[in-house]
Image (spheres, rainbow, N blue to C red):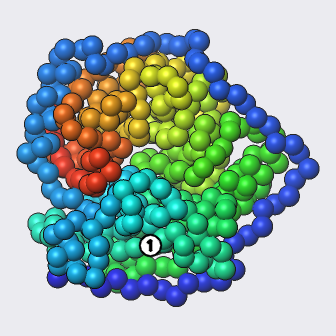
Amino acid sequence: MSITVKFMPPEVGIFTPDIQTDKPELFTGSAPINHYNGYLRPQNNKAARELGDKCAAEMKASIIADFEKNEAYCTRHPEDHVDMMVHVSTFAIIDGYIYMTYYANTGTTAEDPFYQESRFAFCPCDDPSDMTIVKLLKAGEKLDGKTIDRVYDTILLRKDDDVLYLMWTASADGLYYRFYCTYTISTATLSPIRPNRFKVGDVTNDFSISGMITALSANGIAHKSMWSDIGIMQKLTTREENGELWYYTGAYSGNFNCIIKSRDFITWEYVSTPDFINESLWENAVYVIGDKIYYFVRQDECMQGFLTCYDLTNDTWAAPCLIRDAQSRSDFILYKDELYLIHAPIDRNGFGIVKVNQEDLGKSTPVLVADMHDSLFYPYTDLYGEYAYMSYTINRKHIRLSRFKLENYLG
């Protein structure tokens, strides 16, 4: 039986004016990477392709559930309509339940933010048909007097086993913000929606395009061009600093990508951005191990993503290793103390896994190249027991969760 979710009343006065600065906005450009340490071509690795075929077959045999409003769901909920488009998923598994976020278009098949809504869904692991799907915010609605005119990427961050942070990007009166609310599992309650905050140095603004630009400018930090929506990456890793636990991840808007960190998932602090020339675009995967932050991002108008590493102790970036045929969202996982990069090809029909050489990125090695012979893109992976669970988009029609046994491929 579906759980009834309770909504707390909306709040007023949630938006804050940006702190003003007389310092000019500074820009950095984009250009191809000329100096790099290593160039990987995973698709040319026969052993990786053969292992990928086995993984693809296991995943197709291990589909757990689709999480959009499909015909079966709407038959059980006749007041709802079948989704026309769904995209960009994140999930968590807690106490026998799967929790999933994504965004959806109920009116057209287009990926069009003017008609989209942010979504939260959950179901028991042993009975996915008993699914609850909740709209968080939809284009056209009002929030504290502002009109929400566009909605985009929606993610889920898990701080403990009872409170989930549901976060998405939406444009309010023409300005993109990062918004969040919390879901308390024990009471099935959603908190009011509020903007996230973005901090650079001593300047803290609402996490909006203008808030980011003003905060960076006030601190004399140049940035690449920001346009369209704002993203925060789903994968969190932690580091203790001065007795406090910090959560690290990536943030992006258009060609601008950076590392951010937070203690509370509400205020996010700018850490750094790659200091070498590159053509970064959109999603940047981030993973902290000790004093190093491993970093991967696709690039604009070329087929190479780049893998690099930021040293927190001396504020330096490693020479990047290029990885051929990289598009879509990428991710890192840590398995048996080894770091692996999960990357997606331009054709968006599968994924690859590269074992990251933590001492010399140029010696990283392809492990697996899985061609699903069907749509699979924007993969997000997390580890539970012996399995890697992966959520992904199928032709922008399905939000799917599947799994594969790690030791079969990474052991």
Q: Which residue is mark 1?
A: 136
Task: Pick out the residue farthest to the front.
Answer: 108
Which quadrant: the N terminus? bottom left
Q: Secondary structure at mark 1?
A: strand
Give the residue type that dot 1 points to: Leu
Residue positioned 29% across, 77% down in the render:
80
Left or right? Give the position of 308 relative to 220.
Answer: left
Q: Residue at x 73, y 70 (%)?
A: 16
> In this rendering, does residue 99 appear at all?
no
- Exactly how many numbered labels are in the figure? 1
Q: Residue 198, percent across and down? A: 66, 56
The vertical placement of 402 against 139, above or below, is above
Res 133 quadrant in image: bottom left
* Quadrant location of the C terminus in the rendered image: top left
**Could you classify mark 1 by the number of other residues whose Cα lies within 10 Å: few (under 14), some (14-19), or many (20 or more)?**
many
Nearer the observer, 237 or 367: 367
Q: Is residue 404 above or below residue 165?
A: above
Is 299 displayed left or right of 143 in the figure?
Answer: left
- What is the x, y in percent for residue 192? 52, 79
Looking at the image, residue 241 sits to the left or right of residue 380; the answer is: right
* Residue at image point 12% right, 43% down: 60
* Residue 257 screen position, x and y as percent: 59, 39
